[in-house]
Amino acid sequence: MLNKSGKGTMVSNLKKVSLILLSGLVLVSCASKESSLIVEDDLEIYDPYEGYNRFMFNFNQHFDDIVVNPFIKGYRFVTPRLARKGIRNFLRNIKSPVTFANQLLQGDVKGAEVCLLRAAINTTVGLGGLIDLAGYNGLEYEGEDFGQTLAVWGVDHGPYMVVPFLGPSSLRDYSGYFVDGMADPLRWYLFNIDERDLFYTKLGADYVDIRESLYDTLKDIRQNSLDPYAATRSIYYQSRRALVSDQNMESGFNTPSIPDYDEED
């Protein structure tokens, strides 16, 4: 049971989420795209803040060189590949309630069913999710977030954004990540029992896991692209389109070939 303080905080947070999301959707629908619309490999990319985004992209690359990449190299050195895979499986498993909710919001009943079965199997006989037994038995993981849900509902990306320390996304997708974080039942529970540090630790683990999975792809882009900013932007849009199209396979929409972010050399 949530105490009164917890209920008040949750209601206040939900109001903030609604206002932020509403503001984002208004910006998406009202912004003029004519002067900043880029058509690239059959992708429409709206990048009205390209000057700022390029500056922030360079800033993030310097931050990666100084802080993130050395940490990821150390993480890989001290953590065997199998252990890193187990951590990734665990993080995916505890995110199951959010994934399940987004599956339902997208009208993907079969996907929601698979998500429930995966959570049940991996939580019980998969050692809390460290071992993806469900995946070994044909119930493949399918990541879902509220940004994808908004896309299925017909909401456009809106402006492309490069955020300090976090990297590339779009107004729609960053709004979606924010909603997912605020709506996460694990967050509600840990905040209600005054264990916020555990939730922030989980966010930190998510960040490390994502950056570790992207390390080789980003390194390849920097070494082999004439314009790493444009290449990263294009790959981001391709990957998001592929993720969204997984929810609309009956439409016959063919997704482009993109790097597998979960693979390592």
Image: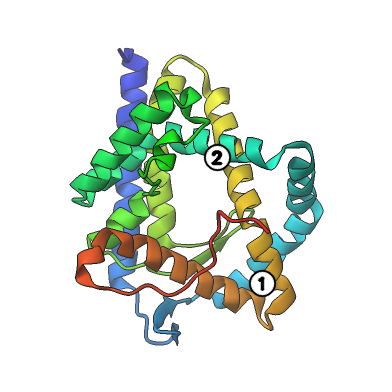
Asked if residue 188 shows in the view, the reply is yes
Residue 58: where, in percent of width, then height? 70, 68
Residue name at image x 18 percent, y 51 percent? 107
Is 156 in front, or is 257? 257
Residue 110: where, in percent of width, then height? 21, 46
Residue name at image x 30 percent, y 34 percent? 117
Identify the residue under disc 1. 221
Q: Amino acid at mark 2?
A: Arg
Quarter containing the N terminus = top left
Identify the residue under disc 2. 88
Residue 93: where, in percent of width, then height? 44, 34
Residue name at image x 31 percent, y 21 percent? 7
Left or right of residue 86: residue 170? left
Which colour style is shown? rainbow
How crowded pointer 2 is (Cα within 10 Å; few <14, some 14-19, many 20+) is rated as many
Quarter containing the C terminus = bottom right
Element at label 2: helix
Left or right of residue 232: residue 181? left
Q: Amino acid at mark 1?
A: Ile
Q: Nearer the viewer, mark 1 or mark 2?
A: 2
Asked if residue 14 shows in the view, the reply is no
Query: Is the residue under label 2 in contact with that under label 1 (CB below 8 Å)?
Result: no
Is 46 in front, or is 43? 43
